[in-house]
Image (cartoon, grey):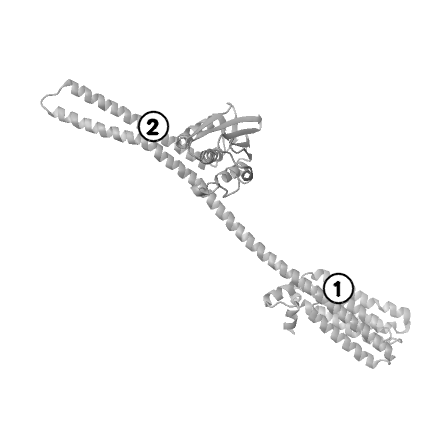
Amino acid sequence: MLRLLTRLGLRFDDTVEERRFVDQYVRGNIGWTQVAMLLGAFTYAGYAFWDWVLYPDVVATTLAIRGGVAVLVLLPLTALLSVPAMKPWAETIFLVYCVVPGCVLPSVYLVLPSGFTYAAPGVMMVILFVSTMLPLRIGPLAVFCLTTWIALCIAESLGPALPPGLRFINHSLVINAYALSLYAVAAREFRARQQFRTAQALKQEKERSEASLRDLHATQSHLVQAEKLASLGQLVAGVAHEVSTPLGLALTTSTTMEADLRAMSEVLNGTAVRRSDLTRGIARIENGLRLTSENLHRASEMVHSFKQVAIHQADEERHTFELGGWLSDLISKLGPLLSRQGLVVEVTCPQGIILNSYPGALAQVISNLAFNAAAHAYPDGRGGCFTMTVTQPDQALARIACADQGVGIREDLQARVFDPFFTTGRERGNIGLGLHIAFNTVVSSLSGRIALESEPGRGTLVLIEIPVSS
């Protein structure tokens, strides 16, 4: 039987899945089912009014039967479902609630003068209530149909004999009602099982999607952090390259002075010392000390400037600063790195624009845009110009227009430039997070907006609008 129900789609192979379905299907709406059970109890007892209308002499007996079943069985079973410990037994309670009045009902017809002449409509009303108002599955409903039909047959055998045709009609109507109720309940349960399985599949897919999304966000966060560190790494590489020149000159000069000092020592240790040799040696040493001091001072300034840029990019605190002077200072520090890629930066900014914002975040955005222009706007290494024009359309807003005159961006790619991992330079090792970081930084950290306009062969314009007080 279980195998047949499984084949018909009225049972799940997995016992855990079957148990979950029963919990949802049978016990999912206990409150509404209790309301239906109360309605059924009052309706069952209320049919005594019909008995009073037709046969007032026997209404006391029929009311005792109907009311007794309602008070002693139906109402207590309804109340029993309110006990949390009894909810696992809900399906059994439903079955008893149906079987008892269905089996007791034929006894009413034993005391009515009409006997079982109108028994079929009464039994059919019970079947209608059971199949529509209670969440019975096909198995318990079949038990209900079998037991109530047996009770009807037994009661008929004890009552007055009916004409053969009427008995046949009564049983035909009842059996038809049983068949229709079994089909309706089976179809309802079949659809419920399909919906349950679909809901379970959607839930599992949602959980997998959420897990994948969490992993993707974690990976993206790591990559974004790695890209930020890579920009600092690029800065360190630039520092090493730029500082190596003055340090190399200082080292070469000091080595030369060391040789001059040895030569002067040898001369002084000799018997004859000429004034011209001393004068020439001292002049060379003075010149060497001057060159060494200048180059070491230049290297120190570079290290300090690059250190400030690195601090700006890592700074997450809000400060009040004058935008024009801050931009000039930032570009002067980034200039040596950008000049290595042939990029000339021009800044136009009126004095007096005061921002209360995050200079570290803004430095990250400007750096990403400048290096992105150097890498993509002028890919052949010929270099070009990168201009920044600052305006203040109103007192609460500052606008920075960053433009180049490079190769531009195709129209079909412009909508994707701020997407994570989108790049046209994958073969050169780019991972496509520079503009994505700039976009997120402007929108989230600076509470602003960023937009891009480009035309192939005529350069690219990036507009940044940020509030003067983030």
Question: Which type of secondary structure does the marked residue at label 1 adopt?
Answer: helix
Could you tell whether 184 is left or right of 170 in the image?
left
Q: Amino acid at mark 1?
A: Met
In this view, 151 is above or below 136? below
Quadrant in which the C terminus appears? top right
Residue 258: image x %, image y %?
21, 29
Which corner quadrant of the image does residue 151 belong to?
bottom right
Counting other residues with Cα less than 10 Å from the Cα at mark 1, is it few (<14), some (14-19), or many (20 or more)?
some
CA–CA distance between discs 2 and 1? 91 Å
Q: Earlier in the sequence, mark 2 or mark 1?
A: 1
Q: Which residue is mark 1?
A: 133
Residue found at x 79% / y 69%: 126
In the rendered structure, find residue 282 and report the number of the disc placed on it: none
Q: Which residue is mark 2?
A: 298
Residue found at x 15% / y 18%: 275
In this view of the protein, which residue sits in the foreground, 51 or 305? 305
In this view of the protein, which residue sits in the foreground, 411 or 368? 411
Could you tell whether 30 is left or right of 176 in the image?
left
Q: Is residue 198 visible?
A: yes
In this view, 404 is above or below 5? above
Question: Which type of secondary structure does the marked residue at label 2 adopt?
Answer: helix
Residue 252: image x %, image y %?
25, 30
In this view, 14 is above or below 315? below
Q: Is residue 135 visible?
A: no
